Amino acid sequence: MEVSPKEVKEILEEQIITKPGIVGVSVGSPVKVYVEDIETAKRIPRYIAGVPVEVKVIGRVRVLAAFTSRVRPVLPAYSVSHPKVTAGTIGCFVYDREDGKVKLMSNNHVIAASNAGKYGDAILQPGTYDGGRLGRDEIGYLDKYVEIKYAPYYNDMDVALATIETDYRTEIPQIGFITGIAAPKKDMRVKKAGRTTGVTESYVMDTNATIKVEGYDGKTAIFRNQMLIVQPFAEGGDSGALILDDRNRAVGLLFAGSDEVAVATPIGRILYALNCDIISGKRRYGVPSPYGLVFGLATGIYLLSKYL
Amino acid sequence: MQLLHMVTIQEAVDMFRKEYLRRSGVVGVSTDGRAIIVYIEDERVKAILPYVYHGFPVIPKVVGRVTTL
C-alpha cells in the first residue's frame, strides 16, 4: 500500500520526534531522522510505513543565535549596534542621575563605534549584522561614552549609554529581574544573556586583572581591574551583556574574550563613573554618587568644626 | 647594617606589569595575593618569563588572544 508523505509526516511527529534523543526529522525518500548519539540511532526502525529511514548522528542541537531578532518593547540581551558596527548586546537600562533620563547601557565598541560615534548618532535594534537599518530600526541616540585610550595608556571600562526613545522592559529574558548589585568574587557563579550565545553560566577566575584587548579598529587597549570568567561563556556579539550572580544581582559588563576567558568590568565602577543606577521593574540599584560623597564629607566636616 | 626594602606583592605586580605587559604574547597580569599571575597567548611565551620576580613566584596561564566580542 502506498503511503502519502503526509501520513509519514504524521507518524514521525506523533511517534518519533517526541522520543528522547531525537533531534529532528525530514520527510522524503528516504526519511531522515537526526539523533543525538549512536545509542538512540540503534533504536530507530529501518522503515517507517514502508519508507526507508536514514539515521544521522548530529549531537545535541543548541540555539546559537538566541537574541538576534527585532523586539519591541526593547529588552536587555537583544542585538543592538551603532550603524557603523556589526552587533552587540543590550546590557540593561539605567537611570542617569545627571539628567533624570532612562538610558540603554552597552559597550563603547558596540554603540559608540570605538570612539568614532558622535552624540546623537542613531542606535539600531537589531544591530546592523542582524538586519537593523536606519530609517526603520532606531531605538534611541548615542548619549555618552567613556573614551577608549589606546596602549600604552590604561582604561577602566568599555561602556556607553544611549537614550531610549521607544517602549522598553527591564526584565532580562530567561533570567528575570535584576535584584541588586554585587562585587565580583573569585569562584563566584555567574550568568549572562547575550545576543549570540543566549543564557550561559560559568564562574569568575580573577577579579583584578590587567588585560590587553585587541579589536578596537585594529588597535590594542589595556584595561585594568577587570574580572575574568572561564569560557565557554561568551562569543562575538555578546559584548555589552550584563553579568549576574546566582541571586540575579548585577556583577559586571561583558566586553571582550578569548578561547579561554571572557573579560568584564565590575558594574559598581561603571555605575559610579557614569553616575547612574540600574533600573529593574520599579526599583533602582546604584552606588553612592561621587557628588553625594563629597557633599556628605563636606557636611560632616562642617558639623564637626561647629560642635567641637 | 643596611636595611633591605621588602617589596610587597602589589609593588612586584606593578613593576612586572610595566616590564612585561608591553611584550608580544603577554596578554595580562594579575595576582592571587601570593604569586604573580601572567596571562599569555600560547605556551611559547613562557620562555620569556622569569620563574620568580622580586621573590614572588610567577605563574603563567595560557588564555589565547583577547579581542572585543
Image (cartoon, coloured by chain):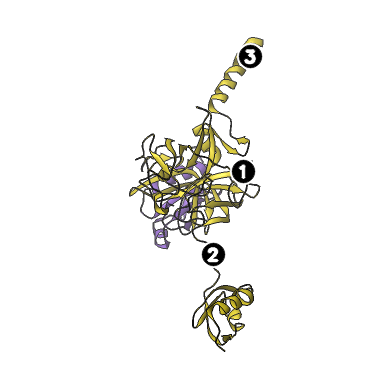
Is mark 1 in CB contact (under 8 Å) with mark 2? no
**What is the drawing colour of chain A?**
yellow
* Co-location on one chain, circles 3 and 2: yes
Q: Amino acid at mark 2?
A: Arg
- Pointer 3 residue: A303
Q: Who's the residue at 59% across and 50% down the image?
A: A186
Measured as percent of width and height from the top left, residue A14 is found at 63, 74
Query: Of helix, strand and loop, which one carries label 2?
Result: loop
Q: Residues within 10 Å of mark 3 (few under 14, many from 20)?
A: few
**Mark found first going from the N terminus, 3 or 2:** 2
The residue indicated by pointer 2 is A62
Residue at screen point 61% across, 77% down: A16
Look at the image and give the colour of chain B.
purple
Disc 1 to disc 2, C-alpha distance: 25 Å
Tell whether B25 sits left or right of A289: left
Which chain is mark 1 on? Answer: A
Quadrant in the picture for the N terminus of chain A: bottom right
